[in-house]
Amino acid sequence: MNVGVCGLGMMGRAHLANLLRMKNVTVAALCDADPRRLNLSADVRGNINFENVGFSVRDIPRFADFDQMLERGGIDAMVLALPTHLHAEFSVRALRAGKHVFCEKPIALTVADAERMCSAASDARRVLFVGHVLRFFPAYREMHRLITSGCYGRV
């Protein structure tokens, strides 16, 4: 599978690092409007350490323009690690271009935008996957256990 990564901040870099380790996945394009992030030279802060990750992106085509990247061809799926207010717009554009989409959380800022994204995926017969992972974190799982146990009464 050929994957493009759009948005090379902390989460985009985390996805990039993992994609580069996967068998049967080729990172086919990188996209970011910020030249420093696009060249991975921007200092990115977050809760993931990127020192000594052991990957090279030297030969991966790079785009500052999302539509040019989509038109390039050869991309099966997109990882969108953009600010939340851009999720709906960029997901719909990628889906209409025939790409499967992994979109970072949350899906969108409004229910209408989320519904528009789901409709675009259905119309394009492509997968839209949203990275809602918090429910798998230990603290959230414990909170769920406490609430469903009823030990504090009805929540």
Image (cartoon, rainbow, N blue to C red):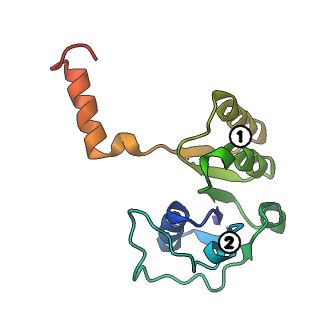
Name above or below for residue 115 compared with residue 27.
above
Of the 4 image quadrants, the one containing the N terminus is bottom right
Asked which quadrant contains residue 51, the reply is bottom left
Residue 58, image x and y in percent?
Answer: 62, 86
Residue that appears at 26% across and 42% down: 139
Q: Which residue is mark 2?
A: 28
Residue that appears at 67% across and 51% down: 100
Residue type (three-letter) at the residue carrying disc 1: Ala
Q: Which residue is mark 1?
A: 121
Q: Secondary structure at mark 1?
A: helix
Q: Is residue 70 left or right of residue 52?
A: right
Q: Nearer the viewer, residue 16 or 49?
A: 49
Mark found first going from the N terminus, 1 or 2: 2
Residue 104, image x and y in percent?
Answer: 55, 50
Residue 8, image x and y in percent?
Answer: 59, 67
Mark 1 → mark 2, Cα distance in angstroms = 21 Å
Q: Secondary structure at mark 2?
A: strand
Name above or below for residue 57 compared with residue 137.
below
Q: Is residue 103 left or right of residue 151?
A: right
Q: Is residue 23 left or right of residue 46?
A: right
Residue type (three-letter) at the residue carrying disc 2: Ala
Q: Nearer the viewer, residue 125 or 135?
A: 135
Q: Residues within 10 Å of mark 2 (few under 14, many from 20)?
A: many
Residue 102, image x and y in percent?
Answer: 59, 51
Name above or below for residue 108 compared with residue 144.
below
Asked which quadrant contains residue 135, the reply is top left
